[in-house]
Image: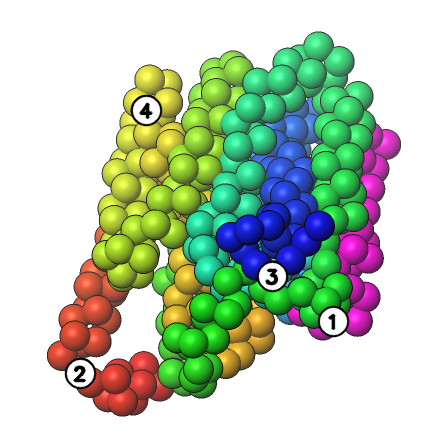
Amino acid sequence: MFTVNNEKKFHYAWIILIGAILIQAGGAGILNNSAALFYGPIKTDLGISNAQMSMYASIRTVFMAFGMAFVARTLDRLGGKRSMALYSLLLGLSFGAMHFFSDIRQWYIAAVVSGIGLGGVTIVGITLFIANWFKEKRGLALGIALSASGIFPMLCNPLVSRLIETYGWRDAVSMVCAFGLLLTLGGSMLMVYRPEEIGLKAYGESAAEETNTASADKTSSLAILLIAFVLACMPNGMVALVNQFSMMTEQLGLPLALAARISSLAMLGNTAGKVILGMLSDRIGSWKTLILAFVLTMLACLGFATSRPEVMSFSAPFLGICFSITAMAGALIVGELYPGSYAEKLSLINTVGIFISSAGSLLIGSASDYFGSYSPVYLIFAAIDLLCITGILYISNKIKQMPAKAFVQFVG
């Protein structure tokens, strides 16, 4: 049934893509992005501050980075199915356990387990599967797989909001947990880490072998830190903003339905952005694509700083592009600069970036408590976007002025 001949018969790589879509939909989408709708109701029920609730997300982010660092090793030892099922259970069961929590310290403990699980089912794990199985159409496949983390929340957030309002957040947690686990565990059963494990070659491997005979790394360690900072740290901070929509609307005295709507619109930007980033990177290059992405997110931050519902609704899809930058740009550039050690460098870049930005949720929550508003926070992130754009312009100009070897010396 399955073959390495991509043109005449169906290739198992597309089954891997379906599995990746299901894992992204249930894990990164439902059990992560949609879960942010619960923060506001939980905070109100427990009578805690934005900073205390945000600490949960910060702890989870730290351990998400820890989990990412071991994804490649876990996949090598346990294989695709068992690894993804293990990470899915860690994420899903720690999320479902919130139904029984009554003290914020219980959330902090669950954040450790949830973060490790989330580190396995998000960017690094899925990217490694796609990299192993697709030698052709890799960017397109990666964009489609990762876009599921935006499509499902976009469709499900209004329903999740209605469940919270109708049944209360505790019962809604159980319902959302069951649906998320159904998707992630179902997808896990389809996953095979490498084509050789079932006697196949990657999609398009024969053509790739003729054109890609060299697989040496092209740059040095300082470039990793530079890429991690620009591509992982700043977008992760903006992701924390999106995850605090429910707390922002609660602080403004606006209905939870607005948080659900702008969250869904942000997921629309997340979904479209991942596919578009991959396509643009192939056509106009990674640096120009990143500049465009940061310009759009900067304008979106300025829109959210107005605190006007109609302006925030218009700006939300563009703010959602921050998910696309985090998910796509690192993988595309690592594939270009580090073909000889793709898995190692991708894991390291994402881990470094997430560790550095792990304090983002806490800092954003604390700043909103201090200012009594999220508007100054959005203005700060607009300024950070501008700095990122300036930095990328400077680096890209240096690259144009130098030969390849000089570029390695410049960044390393």
The label shown at residue 4 is 3
Q: Label 1, on which residue?
A: 76
Instruction: State the residue lying farthest toward the top.
Output: 166
- Closest to the camera, between mark 1 and mark 4, is 1
- In percent of width and height, residue 254 lies at 47, 16
Above or below, 321 relative to 403: above
Amino acid bearing label 2 = Met
Q: Label 2, on which residue?
A: 402
Instruction: Please count the marks in the image.
Output: 4
Asked if the stretch drawn in magenta spans residue 67, the answer is no
- In percent of width and height, residue 388 lies at 29, 58
Amino acid bearing label 3 = Val
Q: Which of marks 4 and 3 is nearer the N terminus?
A: 3
Q: Label 4, on which residue?
A: 314
- Closest to the camera, between mark 4 and mark 2, is 2
Above or below, 356 relative to 43: below
- Closest to the camera, between mark 3 and mark 1, is 3
Q: For the residue labelled by badge 2, is the local secondary structure a helix, a strand or a loop?
A: loop
Cβ–Cβ below 8 Å for labels 1 and 4?
no
